Image (cartoon, rainbow, N blue to C red):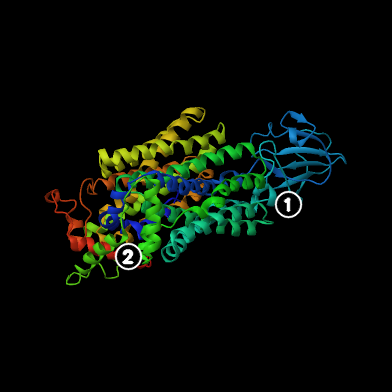
Amino acid sequence: GGPGKCLRWDSVLSRTAASAPAMARNFELLFDSLGHFGRYQAWVYLAAAFQSISCGIHYLASVFLAVTPKFVCGVLGNVSSVLIYNSSVSRIEDAWTLWTSTQSYMLVRLENGEVWELNQCSRSRRVDPLDFTYEYSGNKTDFACTDGFIYDRTKWQSTIVTEWDLVCQQEWLAKLTQPTFMLGVLFGAVIFGDIADRTGRRHVMWFTSTGQFLFGVAVAFTFDYYSFVIVRFLLAMVSSGYLVVVFVYVTEYVGIKYRTWASMHIHAFFAVGIMVVALVGYLADTWWVYQICLSLTTLPFVLCCWMLPETPFWLLTEGRYDEAQKVINIMARWNKVSTPCKISELCSLQGDLVSSTTGDNDHSSMKKHNILDLFRNWHIARRTITVWLVWFTGSLGYYVFSLSSVNLGGNEYLNLFLIGAVEIPAYVIACIGMDRLGRRNTLIPSLILSAVTCALLMLIPQDFRTLNIIVNMAGKFAIGVAFGLIYLYTAELYPTIVRSLAVGSGSMTCRVGSIVAPFCVYLSSVWMFMPQIIVGIVAFMSGLLTLMLPETLGKPLTNTWAEAIKLGASSSTEKPPPTQSCRASEKIEMLSPERHGISE
């Protein structure tokens, strides 16, 4: 969700949200000796994050792929003159600027003398027309649009709508392009997240980034609507698969001091992708050229992604210690560390920690948990419902503000560019707010602000285009802040035993939001402000419910249900650090990541 960005948290949740504390406590020795964000990590991070631009591109590409220009029913024969009200021109191409209302018809006279009234989805031939005037009270014969359609090609030479006549009875097919893409995103996140645990992060990144290039180009060569949707569905799967894995990948390469910033700013690269969509949309007016140009952004990464190493964490969990040591030695050389950490030292530490749990009576961490555990009592159920609503709101708001930006009037390319650009400061503010004000105290104002901007958009007259765009940007900024911090906040609100499940279920509700969002935008045809009403109400409700969530800033991660429930109580301000046994159980959880995500 995304952005469909939710999708990406599925893995962070099932692979790292639960395992992050374990990594931080047991393997943090690696980063203490090698550096938390040295030259090597910076290179790996930028290379891996660069491909996230391509994910942002494909997620929002349909904004200009499926544009519906002005159109009327087509007629056979050569047009000699066109009349709209009192204005007359000789060619239909010159008449589009005069035809301002789709409710009125376009009157055309053919060279053979026939006079036709052309509407968007119907046409009528006048019987025995005496003269060529707009008003007519004589007999007319109605015909269906069997001779195709005539499109306004002044701005877009061709889109998928003009290519396959996705108008009138076929209009719903054009509107399904974004929801079907988001469905592919959902499947891709679940499938590739699991594969990455089994086969390694690097192989999945190779496969998905190559897939993005190949499927991205293949979309441009599809021969009909159904092949277009199928190839885009596959493109969605590999795009979301990459996003899921890249979050885990950078998390496992960056030390705890920089981990929040590093994972948060993968979003910023995604936002750059939205800006690229706006730029390429402005330069290319043919849909297949536009699609090929967008897909070429993936090429530099495809050519050099084979150089990216596997993460030491995954290699260690698989018992491939020699390979992990090689990666650590390379990191040390790049980061100018003379004595790199030895794997043998870490292994002995792991052995001690794992053996310390053998006499532990609490087997709750090893028990299989399911979604019902998130509703085990009223306190936890209320927390879960609130968290799910925030995930849903973040995704819904993100895509409603992004997709509807092109309908605000003015220059739609500039509008989309600004909507992408405003995300970058939003993530910086989210990072600062989380550490200074706290998670809850940053989340509540951002949700309320997005609700207020929705109300303002309804009050501002349509003529005030600049003001409308600024307020829309403010709404996207606020949602961006909320979206940026919800994954970490969710991970902190639940105990270790269900942490991956909590973030996973949240990310699934997030994807539901991204699938619903395009339909929400289409409701503007029923009433102009319907999308804003929906997002405003949901965001306001989320903001109010978030008041009941506990603050987690500065609190240790909880390991048991009792600790999680006490999190909101005043008596729990001072809490003992987790015991070694708890940490060891988290370590075990990390060593078998494929256990997570099955019930998600």
> Where's residue 299, x and y in %?
58, 49
Above or below, 45 against 241 in this view is above
Percent position of residue 320, x then y: 38, 65
- In this picture, is 348 found above or below 118? below
Q: Is residue 348 left or right of residue 103?
A: left
Whether tag 1 and tag 2 are in contact, CB under 8 A, the answer is: no
Q: Amino acid at mark 2?
A: Leu
Q: Is the C terminus in the top left, top right, bottom left or bottom right quadrant?
A: bottom left
Q: Nearer the viewer, residue 334 or 412?
A: 334
Seen at 52% across and 28% down, the residue is 463
Q: Secondary structure at mark 1?
A: loop
Q: Residue extending furthest front? A: 338
Residue 226, percent across and down?
63, 59
Whole-number angstrom distance, CA of label 1 to CA of label 2: 65 Å
Q: Which residue carries the number 1 mark?
A: 144
- The reply to whether residue 507 is in sight is no
Label 1 crowd (10 A; few <14 / some 14-19 / many >=20): few
Q: Which mark is residue 591?
A: 2
**Left or right, 466 with reference to 25:** right
User: Label 1 is placed on what type of residue?
Assistant: Ala
Residue drawn 35% across the image and 63% down it: 316
Relative to 373, is 300 above or below? above
